Structure formats: structure tokens, C-alpha cells
Image (tube, rainbow, N blue to C red):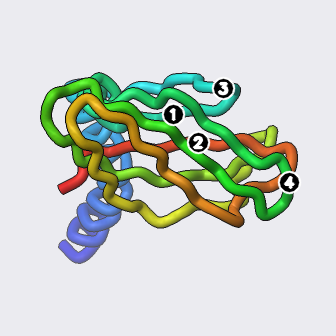
């Protein structure tokens, strides 16, 4: 009986990770995630709704160590949009150098807004802007 309980516990622990990955994949499939290229950098939207309401017009960087990153956003809707934005600075092979904390950004209806982060860029790297729905 002990062996059966140990086997069941082991299978439960091993099966949790694949089940969680499947659940996450299914949720992304329903909500729709998007990856968009802007100015040679990448924008990732966890929900397609975020990228359909808020457009990333440009991503400008100071190409030096400790440079500034500026992301220009435009609200496509008539209502104020609240998005959560996070930046990743990545090397050419995809290694993440720096990842910022998520910040909520409010963009008035049909207007543009710049989101700036200073001192995080690495020379020759690329930026990945991660946008989520803010709660």
C-alpha cells in the first residue's frame, strides 16, 4: 500500500508541470498572444486584445551601455487604456541581460504616450516589450 501511495504522489508531482503548461497554452490560444516586430525590436502581447487596443508606434534606444529605451504607444480606442508594460534587454542569442519590473501605464483615449526607462540598455542588444492587461 505504501508503494502505491508513493507511486501516486510521484506521478502527481511529475504530471503537474505538463498539465500547467497545457493549461497555459490553452489559455493563450483562447485569448490569443501576439509577437510583433517594431524597429528591429520585439513586442509581445500576452493577450491579443492588448495589441489590438494599444499600438506600439516605435521603440528607440540609445545604443550604448546604460542607454535609454523609449517606447511610443498609441491608444486606438476612445476610452482610457490601462496596460502593464515590462522591458527585457536581450543579447543577439536571446540571453536576457536585464528585465524591468512591470509598470502600469494609462493612455488617454486616441492619444499617444511615451514610456521611458533610463540606464538599462546594453550596446548591440535588442529590446522585448511585454504588454499585458493591467488589473
Of the numbered discs 4 and 2, the one sitting upstream in the chain is: 4
Q: Residue beneath label 2, please?
A: 128
Secondary structure found at label 1? strand
Mark 3 highlights which residue? 39
Single out the mark in the foreground, 1 or 3.
3
Image point 34% across, 64% down: which residue? 10
Instruction: Using the image as rendered, state which of residue 73 and residue 99 is in the foreground.
Output: 73
Q: Position of residue 106 (x, y in %)?
A: 27, 51
Q: Residue at x 86, y 44 (%)?
A: 124
Q: CA distance from mark 2 to mark 1?
A: 6 Å
Residue 106, relative to residue 97: is it above or below?
A: above
Secondary structure under tag 4 reads loop
Residue 64: assigned label: 4
Q: Quadrant of residue 100?
A: bottom right
Q: Position of residue 110 (x, y in %)?
A: 26, 29
Quarter of the figure with the N terminus:
bottom left
Q: CA distance from mark 2 to mark 3?
A: 11 Å
Kindly report the distance in space between the C-alpha atoms of the residues bearing marks 1 and 4.
Answer: 21 Å
- Looking at the image, tell me whether mark 2 or mark 3 is earlier in sequence order: 3
Residue 67 drawn at (x, y percent): 76, 57
Q: Which mark is residue 43?
A: 1
Q: CA distance from mark 4 to mark 3?
A: 17 Å
What secondary structure is found at the residue carrying circle 2?
strand
In space, the residues marked 4 and 2 are separated at their CA atoms by 17 Å
Of discs 4 and 2, which sits in the foreground? 4
Contact check, label 4 and label 3, Cβ < 8 Å:
no
Label whose residue precedes the other's in the sequence (2 or 1) = 1
Q: Counting other residues with Cα less than 10 Å from the Cα at mark 1, is it few (<14), some (14-19), or many (20 or more)?
A: many
Q: Is residue 110 left or right of residue 56?
A: left
Q: Residues within 10 Å of mark 3 (few under 14, many from 20)?
A: few
Residue under the image location 55 percent in, 52 percent down: 87
Q: Is residue 119 visible?
A: yes
Amino acid at each position: 500500500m505504501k508503494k502505491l501511495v508513493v507511486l501516486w504522489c510521484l506521478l502527481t508531482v511529475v504530471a503537474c508541470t505538463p498539465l500547467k503548461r497545457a493549461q497555459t497554452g490553452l489559455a493563450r490560444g483562447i485569448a490569443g498572444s501576439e509577437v510583433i516586430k517594431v524597429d528591429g525590436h520585439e513586442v509581445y502581447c500576452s493577450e491579443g486584445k492588448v495589441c489590438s487596443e494599444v499600438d506600439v508606434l516605435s521603440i528607440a534606444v540609445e545604443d550604448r551601455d546604460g542607454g535609454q529605451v523609449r517606447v511610443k504607444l498609441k491608444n486606438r480606442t476612445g476610452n482610457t487604456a490601462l496596460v502593464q508594460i515590462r522591458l527585457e534587454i536581450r543579447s543577439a542569442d536571446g540571453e536576457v541581460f536585464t528585465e524591468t519590473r512591470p509598470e502600469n501605464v494609462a493612455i488617454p483615449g486616441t492619444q499617444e504616450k511615451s514610456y521611458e526607462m533610463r540606464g538599462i540598455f546594453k550596446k548591440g542588444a535588442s529590446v522585448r516589450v511585454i504588454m499585458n492587461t493591467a488589473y
